[in-house]
Image (cartoon, rainbow, N blue to C red):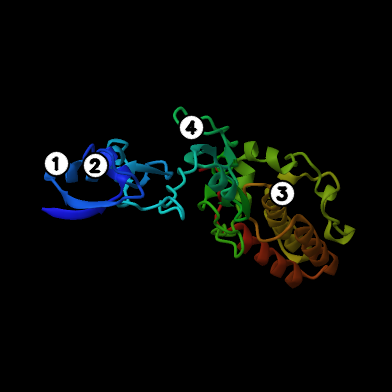
Amino acid sequence: MMRIRLGCLAFAVLFVIAGCTDDEPTSRSLTGSELRILEALQTGACCLPDGSCILLTEQECKDAGGTYQGDETACEPDPCSAPPPPPPAEGACCLADGSCVTTTADDCAKQGGTYQGDDAPCDPNPCPQPPPPPPAQGACCLADGSCITTTADDCATQGGTYQGDDAPCDPNPCPQPQPGGCGHGYWKNHESDWEPTGYAPEDPIASVFTTPVELQIPDGDTFMDALRYPGGNGPSGAARLLLRHAIGAVLNAAHPDVNYPLTLSEVTAQVDSALASLDRKTMLDAKNDLERNNGGGCPLGR
């Protein structure tokens, strides 16, 4: 049996002794049932789920879902740790690329996004979509060996060969066309190919070249006449041989599809200089140079 000194008030609660006063404490042994009653009346601090503290019996605290801190414990100082704050609200966040992520308002702002509101969904995607990027560009090799930076579609439209996105034009990656030229015989027999040159068979020789009177070239002779010149002896014969190949050189230099090594002005200057010399060898040397260039490979008529 447990012996415990009880005040009069405690005995009154336990319905044990009648007639005693608080001034007259009494000591006696408690029975088992009395002890259980006393224990059931003990209170202490109870930490509730919301973090608050209240004095309850152990059973009352348990029934309230709390945590009993022990008999006769107090709520001051507060023994209960505050519950963790609720997690921040999340919602749809629209990013610059049009994608949507679910995150907090603060994290959305850090990513440069636009927060759509707490609990806003990402499905369906509420975010405005950015305009499509411009088409990629790269080096485009044209038929004349030049290189331009453009799109694959525009390159194809111009008949070029696209080298790939972001491919540079410097250094020039394009294969260079080989020099070529059509001989005087080709031009004599293919008048239909003259049109792109801007010249016609009936154009006078004098419209392009200056022929000294000493060489006896008729004023009215045409391009076609020159292509048919047979040549001959002396300076006059050399001049006719030179003019035969010179007209072919003019047509080659003027045709956009012939990669001739000389420009029209270069052909004119070279021929006029040789004719002005009135020297047969000088004119034949110039003729040989033009004949060699005219035989570089004709790209027409294929």
Q: Secondary structure at mark 1?
A: helix
Q: Residues within 10 Å of mark 1 (few under 14, many from 20)?
A: few
Q: Is residue 68 visible?
A: yes
Residue at x-position 80% and y-position 49%: 205
Q: CA distance from mark 2 to mark 1?
A: 11 Å
Q: Which residue is mark 3?
A: 254
Of marks 2 and 1, which one's residue comes earlier in the chain?
A: 1
- Mark nearest the camera among 4 and 2 is 2
Residue at x-position 61% and y-position 63%: 170
Q: Which residue is mark 2?
A: 40
Of marks 4 and 1, which one's residue comes earlier in the chain?
A: 1
Front-lying residue, 83 or 131 = 83
Q: Secondary structure at mark 2?
A: helix
Q: Percent x, y for residue 8?
A: 31, 45
Q: Are marks 4 and 1 in contact (CB under 8 Å)?
A: no
Position of residue 169 relative to residue 282, above or below, is above
Of marks 3 and 2, which one's residue comes earlier in the chain?
A: 2
Q: Amino acid at mark 3?
A: Ala
